[in-house]
Image (cartoon, rainbow, N blue to C red):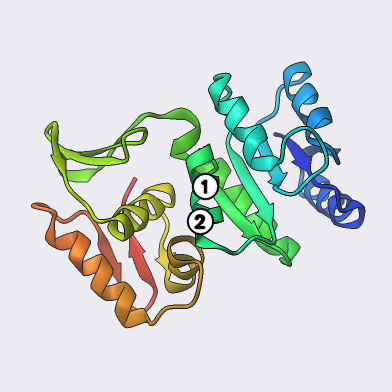
Amino acid sequence: MKILILEDETVLALSMQEFLEDSGYEVKCYAQSDLAYDAIYEESFDLFLLDVKVPGEKNGFEMLETLRNDGNKTPAIFITSLTDIDDLSRGYECGACDYIRKPFDLAELKLRVEQVVKLQCFASNEEIIELPHGYSYDVKKMKLMLENKGITLAKTETKILELLIKQRGSVVSCEMFWEEVWGEWVDSANIRVQVGNLRKKLEKDFIKNVRGVGYSIDI
């Protein structure tokens, strides 16, 4: 498996490269978005690890947006110090599978990479996601469907559902909801309420409660 890293912090980039190579991956590093963009059209990659604030004509968000518009569906993970929920939302709208917040442990990096490889993030290669009990999710329209009938969800409910879909087959913990839905710590009771509101809109509930751990959707 071949990974492209776009990261202008030299020490961090080298650490990531060495760690991932020791884990069996082939890795290429670039410090400027222009060089990374050119490399993507010269070589084939299986995953992008992209910093957002990088030198070059485009930042990480803009580069991935351009790649998606060009039809490139390679899974991507953003590696960034940005914490604002609007920034996190934009990353997913650009077509990213996941976020890793700086600073991070290299063991977390490996787990995130393995998860994306396992699930092949829906934003990268599917427009309609088939879910249990006849449900489906339209990625472009951000719409939950049951037998071609749309189900209206609130903004937070949609973000919760998308995170569960992206991590389908695995359990989503409170910590993951904090980071990727709210962008900050929220009380676990609030998470339960919001997930409960989502489940009330499902005629056939496909969200599993893993007691003491979190929630999941089967593949």
- Give me the C-alpha separation between circle 2 and circle 1: 6 Å
Q: Residues within 10 Å of mark 2 (few under 14, many from 20)?
A: few
Residue at horizontal 46%, vertical 36%?
123
Tag 1, which secondary structure? Answer: helix
Is there CB contact under 8 Å for labels 2 and 1? yes
Q: Residue 213 in the image: x percent, y percent?
A: 39, 74
Q: Residue 183 in the image: x percent, y percent?
A: 50, 67
Image quadrant containing the C terminus = top left
- Residue 61 vs 164, above or below: the answer is above
Image quadrant containing the N terminus = top right
Compare residues 182 and 123 and report the one nearer the observer.
Answer: 182
Kind of residue at badge 1: Arg
Residue 144 shows in the view = yes
Q: Residue 58 in the image: x percent, y percent?
A: 72, 35
Rendered image quadrant of residue 49: top right
- Residue 150 vs 78, above or below: the answer is above
The residue beneath circle 2 is 86
Rendered image quadrant of residue 174: bottom left
Compare residues 25 and 13 and report the one nearer the observer.
Answer: 13
Compare residues 84 and 107 and report the one nearer the observer.
Answer: 84
Residue 25 shows in the view = no
Kind of residue at badge 2: Asp
User: Does residue 152 appear left or right of residue 31 in this picture?
Assistant: left
- Residue 29 vs 175, above or below: the answer is above
* Residue 52: mark in rendering: none
* Residue 90: mark in rendering: 1
Q: Residues within 10 Å of mark 1 (few under 14, many from 20)?
A: few
Tag 2, which secondary structure? Answer: helix
Q: How many marks?
A: 2
User: Does residue 119 appear left or right of residue 161 in this picture?
Assistant: right
Q: Residue 46 in the image: x percent, y percent?
A: 65, 31
Residue at horizontal 85%, vertical 48%?
8
